[in-house]
Amino acid sequence: MKQMPKRKLDKGTLLRVIKYFFKSYPVLAPIMIVCILFQSVTATLPAIFLQKVIEAIDKWQPTSNWTEAVLEIRPLIILLATLYVLSIIAITTREQLMAYMTQGFLCKMRRQMFDGMQNLPIKYFDTHKHGDIMSYYTNDIDTLRQLVSQSLPSIIQSSVIVLCVLGIMLYYSIWMTLIVLLGVAIMLLVSGKIGGGSAKYFIRQQKAIGATEGFIQEMMNGQKVVKVFCHEEEAKSDFDKINESLYQDSYRANAYANMLGPIIMNIGNILYVLIAVAGGVFLAANVPNFSISGAAFSISIVVPFLNMTKQFTGNINQFSQQINSIVMGMAGASRVFSLMDETPEVDDGYVTLVNAEIKENGEIIETNKHTGHWAWKHPHQDGTLTYTLLEGDVRLTEVDFGYVEGKTVLHDVSVYAEPGQKVAFVGATGAGKTTITNLINRFYDIADGKVRYDGININKIKKSDLRKSLGIVLQDTNLFTGTVMDNIRYGNLEATDEECIAAAKLSGADTFITRLPDGYETLLTNNGSNLSGGQRQLIAIARAAVADPPVMILDEATSSIDTRTEAIVQRGMDKLMEGRTVFVIAHRLSTIMNSDVIMVLEKGRIIERGSHEQLLEQKGTYYQLYTGAFELE
Amino acid sequence: MIRQLAKSVREYKKPALFTLLFIILEVVIECLIPFITADLVNKVKTGAEVVEICKIGALLAGMAICSLACGGLAGFTCAKASAGFAKNLRHDVFRKVQDFTFTNIDKFSATSLVTRMTTDIANVQMAFMMIIRTAVRSPLMFIFSIIMAYVMGGALSTTFVVIVPILICGLLLIAKKAMPAFRSVFKKYDNLNESIEENVRGMRVVKGFSREEYEKEKFGLAAENIRKDFTKAERIVAMNTPLMQFCLYFNMVFVLFVGSKLSISSGGTLINVGEISAMLTYGMQILMSLMMLSMIYVMLTMSSESAKRICEVLQELPDLQNPVNPVMEVNDGSIDFNNVSFKYSEKAKRYALEDINLHIKSGMTVGIIGGTGSSKSSLVQLIPRLYDTTTGNICVGGVDVKDYDIETLRSSVSMVLQKNMLFSGTIKENLRWGNKNATDEELIEACRLAQADDFIQSFPDKYDTKIEQGGTNVSGGQKQRLCIARALLKKPKILILDDSTSAVDMKTDALIRAGFKKFIPETTKIIIAQRIASVEEADMIIVMENGKIDAVGRHEELLVTCKIYQEVYNQQTNGGVSDEANA
């Protein structure tokens, strides 16, 4: 659910939205503003024309001479009609422009948000709830749309009309204007009161909705447990309580909101009557008029005044109804901006990855062709260039790291992985296994120590090139909407169908993919919800395989595949790992037993290291894990 | 569909009807006000007595106050009726879901049920409010205003003959063109948001493969595409305002010109200034009411999707019924499967279980082993009648499960589900799901048996420790042990553990099994496990493969006769499968 804005509204937000808007449409936006102004002014014209026409009626009525009267009235009507035609043109232009610009503006905002988001460090996604990020794109963009396309233009229009009408009213009669203003003051007072009550209950309603949603979510997810324990009746009565309190807040919030309209409108009606009576009394009592125009009281002033009163109060009403959405729109805008203003991931690496050709004398030359060999292109300060062959030698030396400053989660970790070695990490949840891999691909940066890749400090390597050289498969498999083939090709956009299929065969995914109704063209939606967890993992492995990276990180990559199937897949996996440096994290010891070196982690420290056999001999933690005396959680 | 939803109005029919009443009154008064105002204006114009003016003024003010009262009350009752309607709908849907069987639950995803009970019901609430407030008001307003305008304005009301058809045709045309455009663009918009969500969730993958630029490009294209479609749709709707303004302006010019002509040529007898002014008001009212009607039309079509989704739940039929004369007691924990076959839905091509024949004596310990997808869970879920067999029958305690009272059966057959969960609340509250009236001693006893007491005692609040939503503040192994304790509290005749100790270490696992043997020997225990060690000592081990029983026997027998069992055994003993938190 939407969260109420906690931070204080930044006054600059509204200005920033407006500035953004004008910057996006430097020509069209001013045209639209002119249209709004023109249209608002024409909206107040009837009062003047009405006054003139009624004056004419008053003058000619006793004679009943239409033929002469028409000479006076016709030019007025023709002028009014002409202005109206212009006004309609202005309105049409404005509305069409608005539709065009609002969508363009939103599209631009969306793209900027998305582009900005892509550049954010992983830390941002680890520390923000995904639902909250999503609501920037849905709820907040929606309120922004309301703000730009309706609230702001409507406020401009209402203000212009109110000012114009006020001017005309003052022009005709200051006494009557004062009565109108008095009524308006009462109106504002009442709407402030009711609006306040409404806001209070809307906030409470929002909270109650959150509580109800939380309860429903929990129950719907645990529905089978409810059934197994025959807990239905209790669930029902618990729900009734929460539901009732939501109802209480919801109906109060809506009641206030619903009452506002009729109350304001009828205060307007009373004001209207008041003006009529006052006009009558003034006329009858021959009260001297006091006005800018200096015109005397007459029916030709009272009648337009009545209509102006309506218009005036109508627009005040408009105004008060827009306030709410302006506040909400600003809150939305400030959240959208907060996403756009996040500091992007810095990438000041200058060592890049290039295709390489190895001459017979061992010299490495950069080339544009795909040769199967890669090299790090390393420009030095003195202007020289060196090339280092990409081999997959990864060394962490005395690394310390903490996600939050002051809270170190990795202490003095040293890991040496030579090209082609398989290095495994074992340890309880939170021991720091995944953290180590997060450092290798620089999702996070180390606090102290060194990480070298083929002898190069990884801080010097361009992040995108570093990551290109690492294939990762994570425990939580994320697939994208598209065909199975598209998903595998995600690892290497240039891969041919044959290469993708070959990768799938290698990872052991081919067997089940060919059994899917449309084979490799089967459409996956909703993170591949139509596949089992194990099948999704197999596709993720194929995706990493097609990238053909020299270094692979497998973080619980086969955890959802049952042991028997894993044994079947194992051969493919072994082939896949051949000749690559591989980091493996697994709960299941059978997955990592054949590693060259196994690191046992505990509370961010490596407490044991060695091969399977060596560790068993040590009879330490690993031995206890292996014999099942410990529970890993 | 409407009839189905209307059933949920119930006690809020009264406020709903009152709303209608108040609104009718309000509309009548509102339509009379310009009529009387015209009179007032004319009086003012002819310079009538102040007293007379004040009299009419007082009448008008009284009417405005009445209208205010009616409008305010209508707003109040309407809020009450619509919020109440929503409350009842949520109540009904929730109740319905509680009566769902496993088959029904499988059909709707949890997230979709949440959306139905929140967003969809909120949409319907809004629509309901619109209907009782505006759907009556607008047509009434329209009709009254036309009548009053005709009565008062005579020839002047011909203006409406021109503008009303224009407006109606225009609005209909716009609505007709805009609706499909919007519907298609909304679907695309949903897809766009889904792809954003995919990116947010899969950011590690995107960054891991350095696909940021690729994703930006993809998103940019999709966003531009949507912009175009949205603009197209919005531009159609944007014709509403000019159309409306045209009608208003036409009315203004027409009334002013023709009105002044009639007024002057008749010397004020046919039409006077007051009527001219009133005609402008009526014109406004008529046009506004038409505009509102077209808005309602749009709103209703939008919310009809939501209504449909809610009805789907309300009309879903539970496929298990309690028998007419149910057996209210379960004799013992014996279980018999007689030629049982089962598939999850009639349309399913493949049977989940085929030709199952099993006879389990009361008090036996039974282990079930098999790969993922071998239907181990399906097999045991038939015992407490979470699903009905497709063919064949199952007897518990010698009686067909279909003859038992469902609640009786399920309290005797206690099951720890594979996808288990704890609910937010204290540990005590969670445990008492098994038995509402359990004493603290009984709770502790059950927890000891499930090897949960030790770690519970280590918490500062012990048995009053709060469990967070989703049970995130206990580890997987602890959660599983709590779930076992909860199931034990039922004091069941049959206890089924569906892979319920996968995250528990082997030592504790063994202790739990030993406890079962010692303290609940009469209870039939069925244990589904991945680890051979968990079932090794069972009186009977069932090996499942592709929905069929591959072999039944004791550990030693199976090691000799069953190939699958051998394979798993060899792999686990040589491979040392120890701990895993997986299916």
Image (cartoon, rainbow, N blue to C red):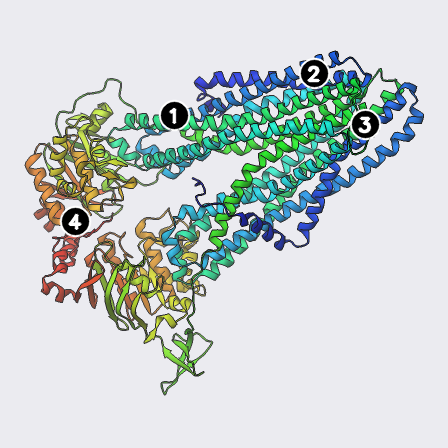
What separation in Å lies between label 3 and label 1 (alpha carbons)? 55 Å
State the mark number for residue B531: 4
Contact? badges 4 and 2 (CB < 8 Å): no
What separation in Å lies between label 2 and label 1 (alpha carbons)? 46 Å
State the mark number for residue A124: none
- Which circle, 4 or 1, is nearer the viewer? 1
State the mark number for residue B256: 3
Disc 3: which chain? Answer: B
Contact? badges 3 and 4 (CB < 8 Å): no
- List x then y, in percent, for residue B275: 78, 20
What separation in Å lies between label 4 and label 2 (alpha carbons)? 91 Å
- List x then y, in percent, for residue A317: 62, 31
Disc 4: which chain? Answer: B
Residue, disc 2: B57
**Label 1 crowd bin: few (<14), some (14–19), many (20+), radius 10 Å:** some
- Pick the front one: A615 or B44: B44
At mark 4, the secondary structure is loop
Contact? badges 3 and 2 (CB < 8 Å): no
In the image, are marks 3 and 4 on the same chain?
Answer: yes
In the image, are marks 2 and 1 on the same chain?
Answer: no
Residue, disc 1: A244
Position of B4 compared to A92: left or right? left
